[in-house]
Image (cartoon, rainbow, N blue to C red):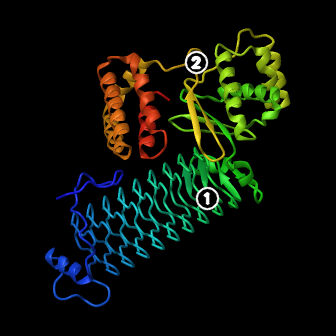
């Protein structure tokens, strides 16, 4: 009789038999003999299983500690609660494998393929995962403390509450990874790629971020006491950008600038251009000047294909609702446009003197307001402890939504690619709760049907907003949705 597996564990549609208790070394060897890949009595020392083919095999609770499994094919195999302490899995293919609560302490997984592996609750303490492929792997609550993950690939990995304390992630690629509540204390992240990932409520105290590429990172409630960051590259991971966007920090400066303070976060779903940033900055500057007691500071701005986030810091939690209200009122009031006479003084202060003066002179010869182009805006009130209250700004005055007809046209231009992306997006809904997954699938089907048939085009934007709201916490689904939004022309 089969059992339901824990939600979020990647199983590739397989069902596995219940755990009947740990096997002894002798019982495990007998199973190897039964598979026809071994013969004779139990050998002494390391078991010679190099290059064996065990794809899809059921090895739940097996004892393979110290086994030589170099270049073994274990794709999709079930090693639920198996013991592989000190096993040599160098260059092994473990794609889609199920290692729920397995013990791989000190195992050698150098260059191993663990793509989409299910490693929930696994013990990988001190394991060698150098250059291993862990893309889209589920490492929820796994123990990777002191593991060697140098140059490992963790793109779109799910590392919720994962223990990475003291781990070496030097030059690792964590793009799009979900590290909510992960423990990265004293971890080495030097030279790593930290783009479009989620560090909400993560503990990075004492971690080393020097030379990391840092862009589009969510940091609500993170802990960075004693963090080391001599310099970072605030850009995408291209060498050309790195040369332009290196930023040096004195000791303690990164911590002082980026530690979690009460934050008002604006999430802008429309197009956001450099000119829009100047307009928004003028709005914030005006609010700050009129309310100096609130200590409002422009903290950061990050942008990806999906959305733009603008973070405003304030002195204490009690200020959040007032700051959020002032920003909302200003955006609604000024949506029809900002009079040039009000806008130019702020612009003049933000630009070099000669350029600001030239713009001011030009403005005296112009007429009409500066129009906002922010699209849909959501405001989050984030306390210092990471707890959040969010809601959308009233839509009565916010203009600049995309022409939905263009979405239909763009779909036909990228039909093949979009169909694949929509299918992948729906597969990842299984990572969410049952009711959420059901609603997300329903909204996605409505979007697909509407843009394919050109029906209900006025409702496509609404369906799309429902999808984005449901998956905004991070992970692979967000990355896929970002690609879909880019191709459809939403963003």
State which quadrant residue 447 falls in: top left
Give the SS element for disc 1.
loop
Q: Is residue 421 visible?
A: no
State which quadrant residue 84 falls in: bottom left
Give the residue at mark 1.
204
Q: Residues within 10 Å of mark 2 (few under 14, many from 20)?
A: many
Residue at the bottom extreme of this rendering: 44
In x, y percent, where is residue 306? 50, 35
In x, y percent, where is residue 199? 56, 51
**Camera-side residue: 264 or 117?**
264
State which quadrant residue 165 falls in: bottom right
**Camera-side residue: 246 or 375?**
375
In x, y percent, where is residue 116? 35, 55
> Tag 2 or tag 1, which sits nearer the N-term?
1
Q: Is the N terminus in the top left, top right, bottom left or bottom right quadrant?
A: bottom left
Question: What residue appears at the point 75 percent right and 35 percent down from the top-left corner?
Answer: 296
Q: Which mark is residue 398?
A: 2
Left-right relation of 125 to 368: left
């Amino acid at each position: 009789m089969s059992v339901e597996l824990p939600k979020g564990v990647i199983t590739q549609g397989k069902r596995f038999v219940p755990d009947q208790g740990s096997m002894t070394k002798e019982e495990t060897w007998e199973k190897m003999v039964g598979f026809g890949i071994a013969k004779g009595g139990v050998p002494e020392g390391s078991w010679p299983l190099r290059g064996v083919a065990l794809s899809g095999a059921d090895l739940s609770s097996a004892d393979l500690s110290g086994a030589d499994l170099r270049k073994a094919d274990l794709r999709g195999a079930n090693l639920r609660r198996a013991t592989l302490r000190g096993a040599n899995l160098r260059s092994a293919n473990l794609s889609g494998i199920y290692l729920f609560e397995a013990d791989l302490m000190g195992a050698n997984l150098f260059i191993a393929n663990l793509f989409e592996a299910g490693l929930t609750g696994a013990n990988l303490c001190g394991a060698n995962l150098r250059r291993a492929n862990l893309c889209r792997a589920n490492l929820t609550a796994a123990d990777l403390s002191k593991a060697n993950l140098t140059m490992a690939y963790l793109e779109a990995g799910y590392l919720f509450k994962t223990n990475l304390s003291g781990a070496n992630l030097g030059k690792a690629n964590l793009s799009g990874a979900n590290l909510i509540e992960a423990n990265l204390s004293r971890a080495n992240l030097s030279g790593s790629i930290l783009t479009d990932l989620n560090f909400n409520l993560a503990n990075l105290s004492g971690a080393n971020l020097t030379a990391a590429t840092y862009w589009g990172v969510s940091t609500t409630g993170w802990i960075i006491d004693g963090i080391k960051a001599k310099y970072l590259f605030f850009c995408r991971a291209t060498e050309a950008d790195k040369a332009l966007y290196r930023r040096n920090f004195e000791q303690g400066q990164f911590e002082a600038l980026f530690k979690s303070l009460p934050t008002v976060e604006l999430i802008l779903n429309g197009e956001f251009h450099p000119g829009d940033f100047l307009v928004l900055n003028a709005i914030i500057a005006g609010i700050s000047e009129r309310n100096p007691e609130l200590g409002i500071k422009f903290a950061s701005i990050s942008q990806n294909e999906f959305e733009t986030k603008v973070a405003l810091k304030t002195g204490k939690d009690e200020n959040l609702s007032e700051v959020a209200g002032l920003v909302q009122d200003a955006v609604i009031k000024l949506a029809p446009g900002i009079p040039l006479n009000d806008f130019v003084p702020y612009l003049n202060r933000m630009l070099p003197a000669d350029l600001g003066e030239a713009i001011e002179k030009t403005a005296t010869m112009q007429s009409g307001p500066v129009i906002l182009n922010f699209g849909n805006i959501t405001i989050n009130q984030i306390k210092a402890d990471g707890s959040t209250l969010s809601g959308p700004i009233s839509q009565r005055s916010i203009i600049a939504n995309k022409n939905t007809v263009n979405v239909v046209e763009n779909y036909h231009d990228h039909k093949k690619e979009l169909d694949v992306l929509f299918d992948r997006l729906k597969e990842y809904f299984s990572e969410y709760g049952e009711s959420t997954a059901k609603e997300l699938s329903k909204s996605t089907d409505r979007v697909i049907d509407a843009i394919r048939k050109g029906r209900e085009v006025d409702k496509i934007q609404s369906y799309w907003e429902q999808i984005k709201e449901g998956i905004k916490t991070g992970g692979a689904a967000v990355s896929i949705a970002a690609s879909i939004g880019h191709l459809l022309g939403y963003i």
